[in-house]
Amino acid sequence: MTGAVAMTEEGALLFGSIEQLSERLWRGEISARELAEAHLRQIERIDGEIHAYLTVVAERALAQAEEADRRIARRRQEEGGAVDVRRLEPSERLVGIPWACKDVLCTEGVRTTCGSRMLEHFVPPYSATAVRRLDEAGAVMLGKVNMDEFAMGSSNENSAFGPTRNPWDLARVPGGSSGGSAAAVAAGEAVFSLGSDTGGSVRLPASYCGVVGLKPTYGAVSRYGLVAYASSLDQVGPIARSVRDCAIVFEAIAGPDPMDATSAPGPVPEVLPTLELGVKGVRLGIAPEYFGEGLSAPVREAVMGAVARLEREGATTVEVRMPHLEYALPVYYIISSSEASSNLARYDGVRYGLREPGDDVVAMFSRTRRAGFGDEVKRRIMLGTYALSTGYYDAFYVKAQKVRTLIRRDFEQAFERADVLVTPVSPSVAFRLGERVDDPLRMYLTDIYTLSVNLAGLPAVSVPCGFSPEGLPIGVQIIGPAFAEARVLQVARAVEAAVADQVAHRRPAVAVR
Ligand code: GLN
């Protein structure tokens, strides 16, 4: 499993950290073109089995890589040959670094499908702000990666283009909905990726694929150009192989944006300066509600094992209560489906996307929507439309909003006594393809520990903390108060360091054989 390939030159290119790779780029030891080519070869070699990519943009990537090489060459010349890599701005660390973009973020001139037949041939005329910021930072986009249709799902099996497979076990799901984003990073098919997280879609696949995923505070990253699922819950977040890489990408994409009225004002949040401060004196909140019925033994052991290691590093634990957590699942599915039923009304065959002709406009609408949407998307639209209908609106939608406030208050009270909460990401490790597709409720329960974070708008990170007996990765979730990204990443970094002996050296066999 550990893979000798990681020691080869190719392995070092595919599994290097952002800082390792950027040092080599700025020192002129490797070129961005070589680095991009190594990744394109890896995609060519293994993506037939993993199916993380829906679209690979090799030519565009090589052009971006050459631009990065020119940028580096110019700077080297200006500085008389050697660039002091320690003096680079954090965002300059991304020059020439290859990444993968979830197919829910608009990319100018590059097909953006959202995992749906509805947008199979949609080529956006503009890029999402997060994508544009990475373009400007000089990162190299390799392509667009697979996802559950319109980000609705927990396994990637709802993609109209076939599921992504988990690199650790090809018979299992990578988690969803950002499954392609997590699988690509785990398998050395990208250094980092962007995902979106409405109820767990960055954290869950990060956990199932053994990588790090950050769901930022609502408003920390612009949603401009993110195809809307549930607008009061959606956030864009980075996925990477280390907490530090995740932090670098977060700083590059975060900050206010005039194109998104819900993006938070104020300076770009800094998370790197405090990353290595450790957990001495940090109060870890443990809520029994996250460790009850339904949690599998290996996940419980790995999470509690990580807590014990943090305690040895000087953290303390406090018990906190989350009395309304049990309502998070119904509240989330009422609110997210209601917002989805409204957001997805725009796919009517008129302005863009699929159009199925009909005798009149109503027939055209309904034939288009029947052909364009998959079963899960239709289920959500029906649930949401029902919850918003006259006579049911107060009983479902309004009530869900009230309970949402109670959940937010539970967190506020918990954070009076604890600096962060430590919880599992998902009740189990990655499950088998097909295992839950016929049982929506069981599928929904996969997100039981992540949904409440979105309802409260908080930042949370999933960081690997161990492996199950069958060799599948397990993540632990660190949740913080609003805009405490620096704190959750600092604790996640401490977890990463504390479990390094068990986790750091392992790579999926498919990626290194
Ligand atoms: N699995 C959840 C859902 O289907 C969350 C998805 C997400 O975060 N985009 O809604």
Image (cartoon, rainbow, N blue to C red):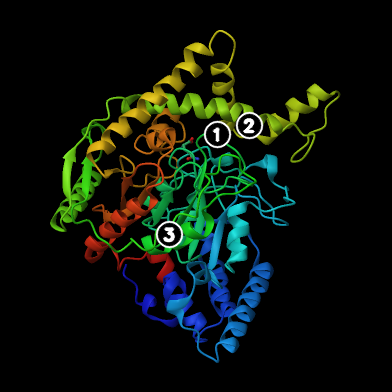
User: For the residue marked with disc 1, what is the amino acid?
Assistant: Ala
* Residue 249 shows in the view: yes
Count of numbered circles in the view: 3
Which quadrant holds the C terminus? bottom left
What whole-number distance in Å separates the C-alpha atoms at marks 1 and 2?
Answer: 7 Å
Front residue of 9 and 390: 390
Q: Mark 3 points at which residue?
A: 246
Front residue of 74 and 442: 74
Q: Mark 2 points at which residue?
A: 343
Label whose residue precedes the other's in the sequence (1 or 2): 1
Residue, far front? 266
Front residue of 307 and 1: 307
Q: Do the residues labelled 3 and 2 touch (CB within 8 Å)?
A: no
Residue 331, position as x, y percentages in the image: 43, 24
Label whose residue precedes the other's in the sequence (1 or 3): 1
Residue 243, position as x, y percentages in the image: 37, 60
What whole-number distance in Å separates the C-alpha atoms at marks 1 and 3?
Answer: 24 Å
Q: Is mark 1 within 8 Å of ligand 1?
A: yes
User: For the residue marked with disc 2, what is the amino acid?
Assistant: Asn
